[in-house]
């Protein structure tokens, strides 16, 4: 009787210990971010802008990159009106022009940006992206090339530029902003969904290669987010779509995605899908019952 009671007590204590360790792991330690250098691509709007605010407020030095300097300066000025969380001292943000589709120069340009910011990089958020609306048959090949350059090769080139710094300092974190469409492909999005699938595969491959260098790789896959992404989406002939989609308009707030990006760094998450339940369900259907998924996609007629 005594032995059973002792065994139960020990079991109970182990359970409490495991629950405590689990809770600790899930409880973000925001102080971890203080003083970290965070490079964000596509920082002038949407999710990139929201990430800039979150990391700035947690005491990071944010290095804001995009094509439009005037827009980046506006973000910098808005950041400087903020107070930081945790009562830590804010670090002046930096602004740099970077076109991630300029593939042959991205690596060198990012290295120049890192050198100009002090020669150190802890976190990179590969966020810059362009969407697409159209039909494969009528879409010019150059449109496929452009979407792949911005969304896939651009992310690869930025990653290749930061890796030597992270290897040298034996640590770092690379975050790829993917999409639910990196898990499932939907009609009228062929180049976009192909680029996001490519990113997912790239990061899954990279993650294991750099793990021994203490470099972490996270992929954050949002569902629809209320940003300008559909406005600037490319169409069959390369012109902009110029409209806010209903789905995008009803999407999540970019701050929600930024919050999960922060958590992916602190909790060292390999992958996070930030999407409603029915999106996650479709990903499972694609995996478990592909024919049902193909049938569902055939029913989707809207561009
Ligand atoms: N909005 C959504 O519904 C949604 C859903 C899933 C994933 N995403 C992804 O989130 C990321 C951010 O998009 P967003 O929704 O914030 O839209 P957005 O249009 O507000 O942001 C895209 C950013 O990328 C920048 N950019 C585009 N081409 C560039 C280039 N060649 N060089 C440098 N910067 C460039 C733009 O200037 C802009 O700042 C993208 O990778 C997108 O695919 C968005």
Image (spheres, rainbow, N blue to C red):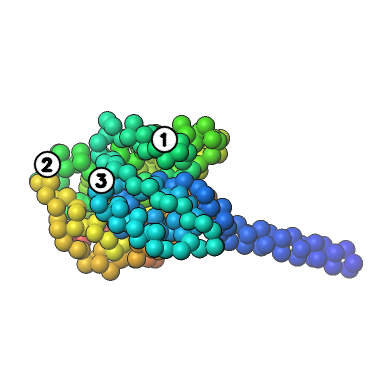
Q: Which residue is mark 1?
A: 115
Crowdedness near tag 3: few (<14), some (14–19) or many (≥20) residues, C-alpha within 10 Å: some
Q: Any atom of ligand 1 within 8 Å of the CB at mark 3?
A: yes
Disc number at residue 289?
none
User: Of marks 1 and 2, which one's residue comes earlier in the chain?
Assistant: 1
User: Of marks 2 and 3, which one's residue comes earlier in the chain?
Assistant: 3
Residue 104 image position (x, y, % from top left): 27, 30
> Which is more foreground, mark 1 or mark 2?
1
Q: Which residue is mark 2?
A: 140
Q: Observer-nearest residue: 303 or 297?
A: 303
Q: Observer-nearest residue: 276 or 107?
A: 107
From the viewer's perspective, is residue 161 above or below residue 219?
A: above
Crowdedness near tag 1: few (<14), some (14–19) or many (≥20) residues, C-alpha within 10 Å: few
> Which is more foreground, mark 2 or mark 3?
3
SS at badge 3: loop
In the image, what residue occupies the spot 38% across and 47% down?
94
């Amino acid at each position: 009787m005594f032995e059973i009671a002792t065994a139960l007590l020990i079991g109970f204590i182990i359970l409490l210990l495991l629950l405590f360790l689990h809770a600790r792991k899930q409880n973000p330690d925001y102080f971890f971010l203080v003083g970290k250098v965070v490079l964000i691509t596509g920082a002038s709007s949407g999710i990139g802008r929201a990430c800039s605010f979150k990391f700035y407020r947690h005491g990071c030095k944010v290095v804001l990159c995009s094509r439009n300097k005037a827009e980046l300066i506006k973000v910098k000025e808005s950041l400087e009106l903020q107070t930081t969380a945790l009562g830590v001292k804010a670090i002046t943000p930096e602004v740099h022009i970077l076109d991630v589709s300029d593939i042959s120069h991205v690596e060198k340009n990012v290295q120049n940006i890192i050198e100009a910011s002090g020669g150190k990089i802890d976190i990179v958020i590969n966020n810059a992206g362009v969407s697409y609306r159209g039909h494969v048959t009528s879409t010019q090949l150059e449109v496929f090339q452009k979407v792949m350059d911005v969304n896939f090769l651009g992310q690869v080139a930025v990653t290749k530029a930061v890796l030597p710094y992270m290897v040298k300092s034996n640590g770092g974190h690379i975050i790829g902003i993917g999409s639910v469409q990196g898990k499932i492909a939907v009609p009228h999005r062929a180049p976009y969904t192909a680029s996001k699938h490519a990113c997912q595969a790239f990061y899954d491959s990279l993650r294991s290669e750099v793990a021994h260098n203490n470099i972490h790789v996270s992929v954050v896959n949002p569902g629809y987010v209320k940003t300008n992404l559909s406005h600037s989406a490319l169409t069959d002939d390369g012109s902009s779509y110029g409209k806010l989609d209903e789905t995008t308009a009803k999407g999540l707030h970019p701050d929600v995605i930024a919050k999960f990006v922060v958590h992916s760094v602190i909790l060292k998450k390999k992958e996070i899908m930030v999407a409603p339940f029915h999106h996650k369900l479709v990903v499972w259907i694609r995996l478990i019952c592909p024919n049902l998924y193909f049938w569902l996609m055939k029913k989707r007629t809207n561009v």
